Amino acid sequence: MHIKKGDQVKIIAGKDRGKSGTVMKVMPAGNAISVEGVNLYKKRVRPRRQNQKGETVMVVRPIAVSNAMVICRNCKKAVRVGSRLLGNQKVRYCKKCGSAI
């Protein structure tokens, strides 16, 4: 996957298009990511104990990886990501400015 945990991403499709946030979780099997503050839904929680009340909780749901682009730290734009070898290490780089991500 071209998106890793901790990356800053911009949402390019869906109901939250234009928003940006940090990737909290990456799910390669489902080709999905969870982004902080994006794709929030209300979940009703039933009371567990006798004296506890039920409540509504905001839950972050995953979105498809294809709906997000990495934000480059250098040029501050949503960019495509490439990979190249630097010495013995594989490094991700910005395809607009060429700097390492």
Image (cartoon, rainbow, N blue to C red):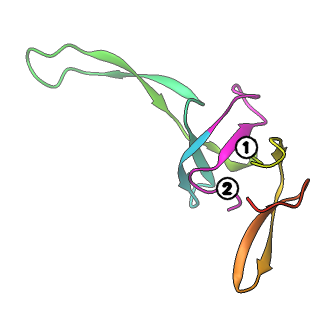
Q: Residues within 10 Å of mark 2 (few under 14, many from 20)?
A: many
Amino acid type shown at disc 2: Ile
Number of the label disc, if any, that sits on residue 3: 2
- Give the secondary structure at mark 2: loop
Snapshot quadrant of residue 49:
top left
- The stretch of residues the image draws in magenta is 1-21
Q: Earlier in the sequence, mark 1 or mark 2?
A: 2
Q: Position of residue 34 (x, y in %)?
A: 55, 43
Residue at mark 1: 68
Residue 49 position (above or below residue 79)? above
Residue 83 lies, in percent from the top left, at: 79, 70
Residue drawn at x 56%, y 29% is 37
Quadrant assignment, res 3: bottom right
Q: Quadrant of the C terminus?
A: bottom right
Asked which secondary structure carries label 1, the reply is strand
Q: Give the quarter of the image for residue 47.
A: top left
Residue 13 painted magenta:
yes
Residue 73, position in %: x, y? 74, 48
Q: Residue furthest left?
A: 50
Separation of marks 1 and 2 at Cα, in angstroms: 9 Å
Q: In which quadrant will I find the N terminus?
A: bottom right
Residue at the (69%, 80%) spot, across then down: 89
Picture coordinates of residue 97 (x, y %)?
Answer: 90, 55
Residue density around tag 1, few if under 14, some if 14–19, many if 20 or more, within 10 Å: many
Residue found farthest to the right: 96
Q: Nearer the viewer, residue 65 or 10?
A: 10
Q: Is residue 53 above or below residue 65?
A: above
Residue in the foreground of this view, choosing between 30 and 65: 65
Q: Is residue 40 left or right of residue 86?
A: left
